[in-house]
Image (cartoon, rainbow, N blue to C red):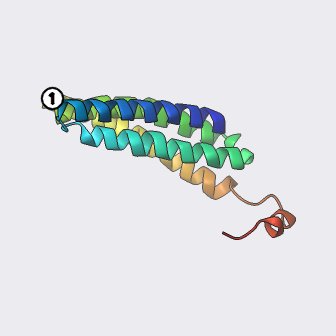
Amino acid sequence: MGIRFLKIAAIYLFVGALLGGYMGATENFALAPVHAHLALLGWASLALAGLIYHLYPAAALTPLARIHFWLHNIGLPFFMLALGLVLTGHTAAVPIVSISAASVIIGLAAFTANVLMNVKANNQEEVGRRTPL
C-alpha cells in the first residue's frame, strides 16, 4: 500500500509541475489554487501517507488504508478539474467541487483514524532501540 501511495504521489507531483510550468509560460496564474492543491493534497500528503504506510505495515493492511486510497484518488482529480472550471468562470461546477472535496476529506478522515489506531511501536524493545530526533 505504501508503494502504491508513493507512485500516485509522484504522478501528482509531475502533473502539478506541468501546470506550474504552463502558468509560468503563459503568465496566467488563475489556476494557482489547483497547482497548490495538486502539490499539497496530491504530492505531499500522499507521499507522506505512503511513507507512513511503508514504515507501519499494520496500518497499510487495513480497510481504512484502502478507503483512504480510493476516496482520495477518485475525489482529487474531480476536485482539481472542477476547481479549475470554477476558477475560469464555470460556476456550474461548484457542486462537483463540493462533492469531490468531501470525498478527499472523508479519505483523510479514514487516514487519520488509521494512524491513530494502527501506527504504534511493535513492542517496548523496539522503542528502546530508536534514537531520539
Give me the residue at 69% from left, 53% from top.
118
Q: Is residue 105 left or right of residue 91?
A: right
**The furthest residue to the right:** 125
Q: In what element is the residue under mark 1?
A: loop
Q: Is 33 drawn above or below residue 88 in the view shown? A: below
Give me the residue at 55% from left, 36% from top.
69
Residue 57 drawn at (x, y percent): 73, 45
Give me the residue at 47% from left, 40% from top.
43
Give me the residue at 33% from left, 36% from top.
99
Q: Mark 1 is on which residue type?
A: His
Residue 74 shows in this picture? yes
**Quarter occupied by residue 50:** top right
Residue 86 drawn at (x, y percent): 19, 34
Residue 82 drawn at (x, y percent): 27, 30
**Quarter occupied by residue 115:** bottom right
* Viewer-nearest residue: 71 or 131: 131
Q: Quadrant of the C terminus?
A: bottom right
Residue 1 shows in this picture? no
